[in-house]
Image: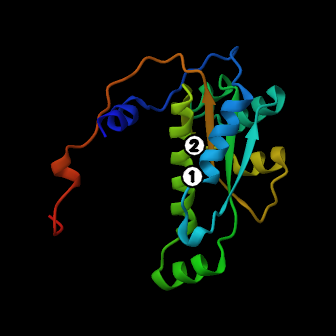
Amino acid sequence: MTDFLKFISDRQSDRSFDPDRPIEQEKISRIVEAVRLAPSACNSQPWHLIVVDEPELKNKVADATSSRLLGMNHFTKQAPVHIVLVEEKVNLSSGIGGWIKKKDYAQLDLGIAAAHIVLAAHAEGLGSCIVGWFDEKRIRQLLNIPESKRVWLDIVIGYSTQVLRPKKRKSRQEIVSFNKYV
């Protein structure tokens, strides 16, 4: 278990990548396989991944994540690969269960898929960053995503050039209690 804790402790959101170092196709295949094997409510698997690695298209997707006004996400152009996570419909069991319990299981499942992507990338020696700020309409146009589909995340992946930063996290006492809410 200590190896796993070290592994997740060393995983960080990287915002600096070597733009001249492409990612090997077999690494992308293993990352995609990790998502394919991810758990989901009622095995619904409500996701579709679009791996964007064609340089010109990737740069256009990166432009759709950037905001000049807010100075956000300009690093995304450095990453050689973007994995765009699109929500698909849940299956009947997950949909009924979500309606009864008033929970959006698809969103939970997409979060699990995103976690699998970044952890699999880290296992491959790659850096990643989950990007939630983007022009959804523009990304839909660029990637031929139907208007009926929701684009949830763009996860950028590449060989990180960023140094490992210490994590700033709440203490265990702030986030955990046993046997009752404290």
Determine whether label 2 and label 1 are within 8 Å by CB: yes
Report the amino acid beneath label 2. Ile
Q: How many marks?
A: 2
> Is any atom of residue 146 visible in this view?
yes
Give me the disc on residue 117. 2
Query: Colour scheme in the image?
Result: rainbow
Q: Residues within 10 Å of mark 1 (few under 14, many from 20)?
A: many
x, y percentage for residue 77? 68, 26
Name the residue: 54% across, 46% down.
Answer: 116
Residue 179 locus on image (x, y percent): 16, 68
The secondary structure type at the circle numbered 1 is helix
Q: Quadrant of residue 73?
A: top right
Task: Say whether residue 159 is left or right of residue 145.
Answer: left
Residue corresponding to mark 1:
113
**Residue shown at 69% from the left, 69% from the top:** 89
Residue 132 % position (x, y): 57, 46
The reply to whether residue 70 is visible in this rendering is no
| Relative to 165, residue 41 above or below | below
Determine the image quadrant of residue 88.
bottom right
Helix, strand or loop under label 2: helix
Q: CA distance from mark 2 to mark 1?
A: 6 Å
Residue at image point 51% right, 47% down? 115
Residue displayed at 80% across by 26% down: 55
